[in-house]
Image: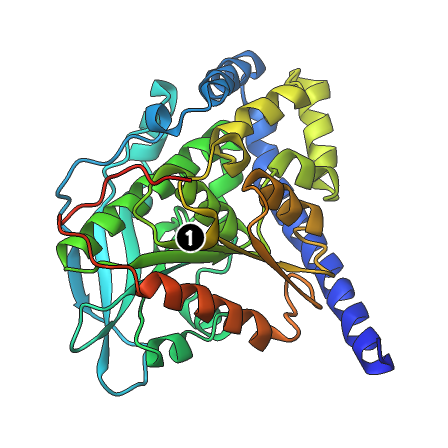
Amino acid sequence: MQIADRALFAGAVLSDHFARTVLSTAMTGAMTPQGLTVDGRAEIRRLDYYAALAARKNPDTIFAPPPSPIPVHTRPGHGLEQAGGRVEVLRFHSPFEPLHPELRRNFRHTANNATARAQHWRHEDGPRPTLIVIHGMSASQASVNATLFALNSFFSDGWDILLFTMPFHGGRQSGRSPFNGAELFAGGFAHFAEAMAQAICDLRVVLDHLERKGVTQIGATGISLGGYTTALLAAVDDRLDFAIPNCTVSDIPRLIEDWVPAQLGLRLLERIKGIPQDLIARSTAFHSPLNYPRRLPIDRLLIIAGQADRVSPPEQSLALWEHWDRPEIHWFPGGHLVHLQRADYLKRMRRLMSVAREVPAPQAPHRRRQRSM
């Protein structure tokens, strides 16, 4: 490795350490007040509930399909500067109903989060094959994701782009949120479990909407928390033609072990509230992609990972790679924030997407089918 490359690699590691500390501190600050005031026994009962669901390892009994059709409202938006295309802002009332009855009231009080949102870049002569992009924690801005994933170039290649907003991010957060996405964690691990279930529910509404518009090829990619959600969606809904998690999280309890001060917050919960860390691990399996079999063929999967990633370390991507029976994986010489030699993995994305694009269009308008592995 050349001196300049070593310097860039070291810079990527340093920036990731800084970002991890900031994000870990912010998450701990969001979760700790709720954790210290919560009834420990009630929280244990709730986490037992999700742990029991996770133990079934059957996504069909956990992530039920949303009712259909859900009305999706559109209005003109902005953000795309290419001829032959337009931007639409999608909104719909999230049909998600929390699984645990004790949390339903809290979700009903978060009015902004009840309205799901997405930005849709469409060709005028569509419908076209569509790439769903799922952002990471606190990074819901369309401009950030457009730059990171070079979305204008994918649009030029003929793809429509749909940028999905995760629960409690962007316009889905309340005015009381201290930072973008804080409310995802502010209600504790039980609340986070329901928020992930809501994300999957809302994404399936998006899939329904695209199919009603005549889209026949749909894939998903996402970074970090977005990669985690992409991988989970690939275990729940077989209508995806490909899935490409990038710098993904796959095992949240293991991730937190390396995050300071988040790991200290877990120990504090165990000591003060009696919430065992192993129960947290078993309950978070409820929404972990490692808990469920993949629904996509191995040749429709691509994992992208950074060698210097210290926010979501390489073992997170490797765990998903092993779980998915070792599909194609691409390592780039960068970290979570600094993606060196990005052109190489964009080329691999295009190769996989071009194969998916050649799949014959199905005869039926809905493709709720079980794909062979």
Residue 350 in view here:
yes
For image coordinates 25% across by 34% down, the residue present is 65
Amino acid type, callout 1 = His
> Within the image, what quadrant is residue 294 found in?
top left
User: Which colour scheme appears in the figure?
Assistant: rainbow
Residue 233, how many percent across, how many down?
A: 40, 43
Residue 162 in view here:
no
- Indicate the quadrant containing the N terminus: top left, top right, bottom left or bottom right: bottom right
View extreme (right): residue: 3
Q: Nearer the viewer, residue 247 or 253?
A: 247
**Total labels drawn:** 1
In the image: residue 325, left or right of residue 259? left
Residue 201, how many percent across, how many down?
A: 31, 39
- Indicate the quadrant containing the C terminus: top left, top right, bottom left or bottom right: top left
In the image: residue 201, left or right of residue 251? left
For image coordinates 32% across by 79% down, the residue present is 80
Q: Nearer the viewer, residue 359 or 333?
A: 359
Q: Residues within 10 Å of mark 1 (few under 14, many from 20)?
A: many
Q: Which residue is mark 1?
A: 169
For image coordinates 46% across by 75% down, the residue present is 150
